[in-house]
Image: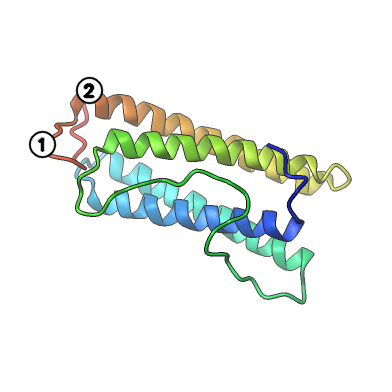
Amino acid sequence: MDLSKYTLEEIILSAIKAEIEARDIYARIADRVKNPFLKPKLIFLSEEEERHRVFFEHFYKQKFPDKEIVIPEKTPVPLPEIKMEEGEKTPISKIFQHAMDAEKAAHDFYSSMAELFESEPEVKNTLLYIAVMEMGHYRLFEIERENALKFEDEDIPMIHLGP
């Protein structure tokens, strides 16, 4: 992902916004699923995204100590959203596919962001570590999506029956 056309401030604010959105959607999904094995995984992922948000907020304050964090309504850096329609009409496998797309994009985004910090190895390594974590999230959603495709009933959306 080419980040050269964005300012560092735009990049960090985009990261914060992405982490907030992921945290919130994973928490919403966790509230709706009935599978007792899936719910803790989603809560864990939500908490992971919250930790990422905290890192990026501290990083922003470090880079822009005199500025207040103002989350943009729409980020300049194009990152896919995790879509979940209201009214529980979206099959969970489809939501998980959106989550996979978002996690892969986050991985690519943070990997590209890390390249901006060649002269700051600690920052670079932290960003690469977060990128790897996002791929771990991707793989978890990939497994759960496969399970959902096997077991979900289109007439009972948002219920993951599990093995």
Q: Position of residue 14 (x, y in %)?
A: 61, 55
Q: Which mark is residue 155?
A: 1
Q: Nearer the viewer, residue 87 or 162?
A: 87
Residue with the mark numbered 2: 150
Residue drawn at (47%, 35%), measured in percent from left and top? Answer: 101
Residue extending furthest toward the right: 119
Task: Please tell me whether mark 2 sits on a helix, a strand or a loop.
Answer: helix
Q: Amino acid at mark 2?
A: Lys
Against 45, is 20 above or below? Answer: below
Residue drawn at (28%, 50%), measured in percent from left and top? Answer: 85
Q: Position of residue 25 (x, y in %)?
A: 38, 52
* Residue 106: quadrant of the picture: top right
For the C terminus, give its image quadrant: top left
Q: From the viewer's perspective, tell me whether residue 6 is left or right of residue 69.
A: right
Residue extending furthest toward the left: 155
Residue drawn at (26%, 29%), measured in percent from left and top? Answer: 148
Q: Position of residue 87 (x, y in %)?
A: 19, 53
Marks 2/1 in contact by CB < 8 Å: the verdict is no
> What distance separates the C-alpha of mark 2 from that of mark 1?
14 Å
For the N terminus, give its image quadrant: top right
